[in-house]
Amino acid sequence: MKAPASASWKGPLKFRMPTAENLVPIRLDIEVDGQRYKDAFTWNPNDPDSEVVMFARRTVKDLKLAPGFIPQIVQSIQSQLADFRSYEGQDMYAGDKIVPIKLDLRVNHTVIRDQFLWDLNNFESDPEEFSRTLCKDLGIEDPEVGPAIAYAIREQLYEIAIQNVTSARENRTSKKGRRGAEHFLPSKAGGAALDLIKLFSFRSSVVRKRKEWDYYKPTLDLLSNEDVDALEAKEERSGR
């Protein structure tokens, strides 16, 4: 089923995630009294701050963590939300901008690698829907893989949105700043990738260049218990 191509917004927009839901990627890596808690998830920046405290208490209770984790979790989430909110209301520039998204993830026994192009102008895009479709197409049964893929996409889109705010600010103050669509920095996916905008559907923001289908097709590996144990031991040593 085909749908109209996504709109091309030229000029300044107010900062937000270039997705249907304006969610903040949150990453936690906290250690208290020899216990370590790592997690990654998204958060609605419009939720009241009291939800953060409730989440921290519930997490500590469910995972049987030390009580000292509660203030650490609260502080980390609130700090990341504050960073996100500091960009709200600021201009960011977009145009016919398509950027590469790369995946290189290990979730439990599953390793997935992929690369595709994402349309920043489609504010109806849905990383979670894309992730569910990708997992279904690849026959991935682990329910934790889909959310991890969606999070990785959102994290990269967040970084790009911040870069667009910085670019807009620098161009606004520079006497040599350019106008219109040139306000944003060209991405490495530019050139031939830009004419792919017409291939995007209203709900989809992902496309693979035909000549690169074989090279960039998703790769999936399933690890043995021994492989996972070795990798986790290596990660633990490197994290010290």
Image (tube, rainbow, N blue to C red):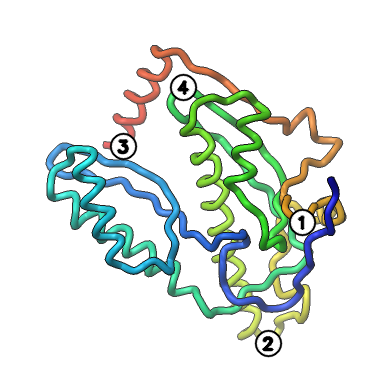
Q: Does residue 87 sit above or below 127 in this rendering?
A: below
CA distance for labels 2 and 1: 37 Å
Q: Nearer the viewer, mark 1 or mark 4?
A: 1
Instruction: Look at the picture and state if 223 lies above or below 142.
Output: above
SS at mark 3 in the image: loop
Compute the Cα span from label 1 to label 4.
34 Å
Say which residue label 4 marks: 109
Residue 49: image quadrant is bottom left
Please tell me whether mark 1 sits on a helix, a strand or a loop: loop
119 or 51: nearer the viewer: 51
> Nearer the viewer's eye, disc 3 or disc 2?
3
Q: Locate residue 141 relative to residue 68 in the image: left or right.
A: right
Residue 144 location in percent, x, y? 46, 33
Q: What residue do we see at 64% from left, 43% from top?
A: 130
Asked if the residue under mark 3 is in contact with the one under mark 1, i.e. CB atoms within 8 Å, the reply is no
139 left or right, relative to 44: right
- Judge the density around disc 4: few (<14), some (14-19), many (≥20) Cα neighbours within 10 Å: some
Work out how far the residue at label 3 is from the one at label 2, CA to CA, in angstroms.
Answer: 45 Å
Give me the C-alpha separation between circle 1 and circle 3. 42 Å
Type of amino acid at the residue the image marks with label 3: Gly
Q: Position of residue 223 (x, y in %)?
A: 48, 17
Dot 2 corresponds to which residue?
175
Residue highlighted by disc 1 = 202
First of labels 4, 3 by sequence position: 4
